[in-house]
Image (cartoon, rainbow, N blue to C red):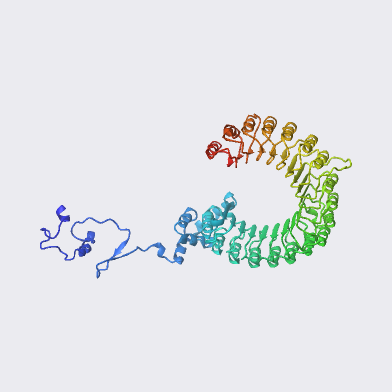
């Protein structure tokens, strides 16, 4: 046999020389394989089929015919016959072309025989009402692309469908377009909540596709979608009758016509929020409120320059079901608008009212609101430049149902109004929050004797004029306090805070003294001794005079404390060690940020505390090396460590 394979033309096998004058011609004979009469081993199978040009010396190679050579129409017919589930997902991984074709197939276009269709319908019914029907996906920034949306549409279709989708931000190179929303519309018919934020590449066409394919939509949130107009919103109103929540922000092409269609066609609408939409005016607001089919409960109007007194009048006359109302930055609404709204007598169910940056809020307007909305429990007023002490005190008299009052950047509000509210609030006011009101001064006031108020939560933040004198009066008036926040008050010292501690009868639960630079260990030790058995949260961030002595008192007297913040305090390793020795201490969150005297010597104590900790902040602790941090992270694997 070796002679057979080694012939050269000079052997006896073929005398007279080689059969082929040109050695390359032998390749033709050898490639015949089994078709010749003598034995020759078959060559290895080639990855490509080879055709030969016999007229030339060289040959051309051509690839085998593949399914990829089929046009989209034929491939579409093949893919729509695939069984649901893993088969479709597997095919979607073949190529981007297959993925996009699969995502373009709607449920009505999927081929199945009668038995398969009946089984599929039953499975679909089971999944729709199960947990699988509420799958949630969120795409942000560079992850927001058409390909990802197509993959989500194909991958979730056999799991009951997508229930909630949020797209925030757009990829500048390959951002979300109408094509991606078309895939969602085809593959996610069970979608109930859809959010589209800062996506300028999507136009009316894309949202209309969603409206047509996702007719179970209940919540729609559009923010900074400059290419979406009334045309798309009208289609949503026509195709999605189950819409209950609508939020529109910074969409300049959405205006009155779209809102009127929503008010007319969406009978289940319960919540609407409109912010910074230049095309929205009184006609749009009136279209939402005056429709007999809409029973709105939550209304938020913010930064709408085209809204005037007329819109507030409509709310006051037709808002019979409104329970939450937010009116922020309405420059063309005057005192008359708020007065008419209050006297419309429709807002009898209003429970929460927020008004900010509206020049129409005057003393007369706020008193009218107090009388016209007798059941308001939560009141939030911010940046009301024309609101004074007289209006606020009159409000508490006119609206005895107020339980929570928040005042922010109301600079005509002084200490007289502050204590006037406490004297006249009655038994229902439980929480008072005052933020950045620069009109409050620290004066020795000779207030008449009165019954203690029922306030249980007090927060005074960033009011530089609030000091010891006001705090002493406050202690006498509010013996039932449980939650106290006095943050950013540099004028408060130990002498002012101690009377408040001594007058508290209920036992303090949450105390925030962050930014009170002049408080010392005396206050914390007194707090731990007097209220240690009720104290759960203590924030001393920025109290630079707090030392290890405070931690020792906390460790001994505060068994219920779960959240402790001593950032920027003068504590050392000895204080951390004392804290760890507290047998009854059950800390869950501990913040030591910017404590430069806490070093690696505290690692054993932190490990011991780690038996209960779920959160530890050691940022900017310069005496703790990265190696020590790594060891701590490895040991406290159940605790979230900020470093």
Which quadrant would the C terminus be assigned to in this image? Answer: top right
The x, y position of residue 256, in whole percent, is 70, 66
The x, y position of residue 513, in whole percent, is 72, 41
Give the total number of marks visible in the rendering.
0
Q: Nearer the viewer, residue 9 or 321?
A: 9
The quadrant holding residue 468 is: top right
Residue drawn at point x = 78 percent, y = 55 percent: 384
Seen in the image, is 638 located left or right of residue 39? right
Furthest-right residue in view?
A: 448
The quadrant holding residue 167 is: bottom right
Seen in the image, is 269 located left or right of residue 418? left
Position above or below: 381 against 446? below
Position above or below: 104 against 445? below
Seen in the image, is 269 located left or right of residue 204? right
The x, y position of residue 131, in whole percent, is 59, 49
Furthest-bottom residue in view?
A: 55
Position above or below: 382 against 510? below
- Is residue 619 something that shows in the picture? no
- Is residue 557 something that shows in the picture? yes
Q: Nearer the viewer, residue 7 or 154?
A: 7
Seen in the image, is 448 located left or right of residue 35? right
The x, y position of residue 517, in whole percent, is 72, 41
């Amino acid at each position: 046999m070796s002679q057979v394979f080694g012939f050269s033309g000079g052997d006896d096998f073929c005398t007279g020389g080689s059969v082929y004058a040109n050695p390359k011609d032998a390749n033709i004979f050898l490639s015949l394989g089994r078709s010749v009469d003598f034995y020759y081993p078959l060559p290895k199978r080639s990855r490509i089929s080879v055709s030969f040009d016999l007229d030339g010396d060289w040959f051309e190679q051509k690839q085998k015919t593949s399914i990829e050579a089929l046009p989209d129409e034929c491939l579409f017919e093949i893919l729509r016959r695939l069984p649901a589930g893993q088969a479709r997902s597997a095919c979607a991984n073949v190529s981007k072309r297959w993925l996009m074709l699969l995502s373009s197939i709607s449920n009505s276009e999927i081929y199945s025989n009668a038995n398969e269709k009946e089984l599929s319908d039953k499975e679909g019914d089971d999944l729709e009402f199960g947990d699988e029907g509420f799958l949630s996906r969120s795409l942000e920034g560079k992850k927001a692309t058409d390909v990802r949306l197509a993959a989500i549409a194909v991958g979730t279709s056999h799991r009951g469908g997508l229930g909630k989708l949020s797209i925030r931000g757009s990829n500048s190179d390959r951002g979300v377009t109408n094509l991606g929303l078309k895939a969602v519309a085809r593959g996610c018919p069970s979608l109930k909540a859809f959010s589209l934020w800062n996506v300028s590449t999507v136009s009316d066409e894309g949202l209309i596709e969603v409206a047509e394919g996702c007719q179970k939509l209940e919540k729609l949130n559009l923010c900074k979608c400059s290419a979406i107009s009334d045309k798309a919103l009208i289609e949503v109103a026509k195709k999605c009758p189950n819409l209950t929540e609508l939020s529109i922000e910074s969409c300049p092409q959405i205006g009155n016509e779209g809102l009127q269609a929503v008010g007319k066609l969406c009978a289940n609408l319960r919540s609407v929020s409109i912010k910074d939409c230049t095309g929205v005016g009184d006609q749009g607001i009136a279209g939402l409120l005056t429709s007999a089919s809409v029973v709105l409960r939550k209304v938020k109007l913010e930064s709408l320059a085209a809204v005037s007194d007329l819109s507030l009048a409509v709310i006051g006359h037709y808002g019979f079901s409104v329970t939450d109302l937010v009116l922020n930055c309405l420059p063309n609404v005057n005192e008359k608008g708020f007065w008419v709204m209050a006297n419309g007598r429709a807002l009898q169910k209003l429970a929460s009212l927020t008004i900010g940056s509206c020049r129409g809020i005057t003393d007369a307007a706020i008193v009218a609101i107090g009388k016209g909305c007798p059941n308001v429990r939560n009141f939030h007023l911010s940046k009301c430049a024309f609101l004074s002490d007289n209006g606020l005190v009159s409000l508490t008299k006119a609206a005895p149902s107020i339980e929570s009052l928040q005042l922010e950047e109301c600079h005509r509000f002084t200490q007289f109004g502050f204590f006037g509210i406490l004297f006249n609030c009655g038994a229902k006011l439980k929480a008072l929050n005052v933020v950045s009101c620069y009109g409050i001064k620290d004066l020795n006031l000779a207030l008449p004797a009165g019954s203690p108020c029922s306030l249980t939560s007090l927060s005074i933040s960033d009011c530089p004029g609030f000091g010891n004198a006001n705090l002493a009066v406050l202690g006498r008036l509010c013996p039932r306090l449980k939650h106290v926040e006095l943050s950013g008050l540099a004028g408060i010292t130990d002498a002012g805070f101690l009377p408040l501690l001594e007058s508290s009868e209920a036992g303090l639960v949450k105390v925030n003294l962050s930014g009170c630079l002049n408080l010392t260990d005396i206050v914390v030790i007194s707090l731990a001794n007097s209220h240690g058995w009720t104290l759960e949260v203590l924030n001393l961030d920025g109290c630079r005079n707090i030392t290890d002595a405070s931690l020792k008192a906390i460790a001994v007297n505060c068994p219920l404390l779960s959240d402790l913040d001593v950032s920027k305090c003068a504590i050392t390793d000895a204080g951390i060690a004392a804290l760890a020795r507290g047998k009854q201490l059950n800390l869950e969150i501990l913040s030591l940020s910017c404590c430069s005297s806490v070093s690696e010597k505290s690692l054993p104590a932190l490990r011991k505390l780690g038996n209960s900790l779920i959160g530890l902040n050691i940022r900017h602790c310069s005496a703790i090396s990265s190696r020590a941090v790594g060891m701590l992270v490895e040991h406290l694997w159940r605790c979230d460590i900020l470093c």
